[in-house]
Image (cartoon, rainbow, N blue to C red):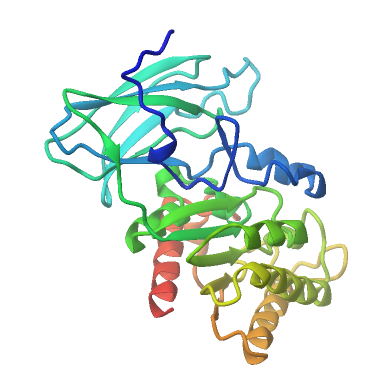
Amino acid sequence: MTPDATWLDPAPFLRGVAWRDGVRTVRADPGDTARLPWDTCERAALPVGVRLEFTAPDGARAVELRYRARVPGPTDALRDLAHCFALWQGDRCLHESFTEPAEEATVTIALPAGPGPFTIHPPESQSPVILGLRGLGGTVTPAPRQPRWLVHGDSITEGWWSTRPAHSWPATAGRALGLDCVNLGYAGAARGELPTAQQLAALPAELLTLAFGTNCWSSVPYSAPLLYETTRAFVTLVREGHPATPLLLVSPVLRPDAESTRNALGATLAELRAAMEEAARDLAAAGDKHLTLLPGRDLLTPDDLADGLHPNDAGHARLAAAVVSALGRV
């Protein structure tokens, strides 16, 4: 396919972008990956939370996107996930357009009457790259930018077990609060890695949320004193770039199999959660007036968990509502 001059550069329309690596949007600093664990780098290559926001001021009937995506092999674990472009307006999903991953393809998404603003959530699993867009029957223009909200966490923050990218708790809370949510959730990782804290410090933001700790019980075991010190160090490094930015720390949510089970260093998740919360309270008492703690234990019930660990759609909605309430108080 040879693009013509009617295709617009997607960059001004993209939201939820932390870094660019050429035409790709990435979720870790591409110039600082050597200090990060391999699992963080692997997850950071997925464009989680990246979306297009635009208006149609003169009545465009549709928007056309040109994209490329990795074509999964027959044994790819993610090959059966829906390759879906979802059109949203405010808090409503208007419709979904299903396509296939391709080395290069286009998708046409019909628009309702009115100028918008509209949001398109692309699929995430096959790392799609938006190459261009254009309005059909009218023009499309970038939507006004909203305050930037950095959200760091693990697979729960990344949105696992939500049925669509737009249903994850960061995406849901971002819509409710009118924020440009930048999702820096790394499934299997987010164990308080200090280079990640320094990367967060280097990014511009009007609001910050940290929601890690679950993987400190299992994948890389922490003791309670180690997580206490790690939390203090992580927040301290973030504060080097954001000394007065409101910061919400969410301690680990319910994980029934881990609450009273000891890991390899003898810590239960309940003890790790208490250590993280103690670190947050001590930082606030030491003078961090812009740090707010949201205890995670009672935010979800077992019925809100799809697999005993990750929230289902109802759980993501409950978690989003709790974060919205906490940030509203901030």
Nearer to us in this view, 114 or 282: 114
Nearer to us in this view, 208 or 263: 208
The reply to whether residue 221 is in sight is yes
Q: Quadrant of residue 228?
A: bottom right
Left or right placement of residue 18 versus residue 212 in this view: left
How many numbered tags mark residues here?
A: 0
Measuring 36% from the left and 13% from the top, which residue is drawn there?
Answer: 4
Nearer to us in this view, 73 or 190: 190
Vertical position of residue 293 compared to residue 257: above or below: below
Whole-percent x, y for residue 294 in the image: 53, 76
Residue lying at the far right in this picture: please name it.
265
The N terminus lies in quadrant: top left
Vertical position of residue 182 compared to residue 248: above or below: above
Measuring 40% from the left and 68% from the top, which residue is drawn there?
Answer: 324
Whole-percent x, y for residue 109 in the image: 28, 26
Measuring 40% from the left and 57% from the top, which residue is drawn there?
Answer: 174
The reply to whether residue 310 is in sight is no
Left or right placement of residue 323 versus residue 31 in this view: left
Nearer to us in this view, 112 or 135: 135
Measuring 51% from the left and 28% from the top, which residue is drawn there?
Answer: 128
The C terminus lies in quadrant: bottom left
Whole-percent x, y for residue 266 in the image: 85, 70
Residue lying at the far front in this picture: please name it.
5
Vertical position of residue 322 compared to residue 105: above or below: below
Whole-percent x, y for residue 299 in the image: 49, 70
Left or right placement of residue 207 versus residue 256 in this view: left
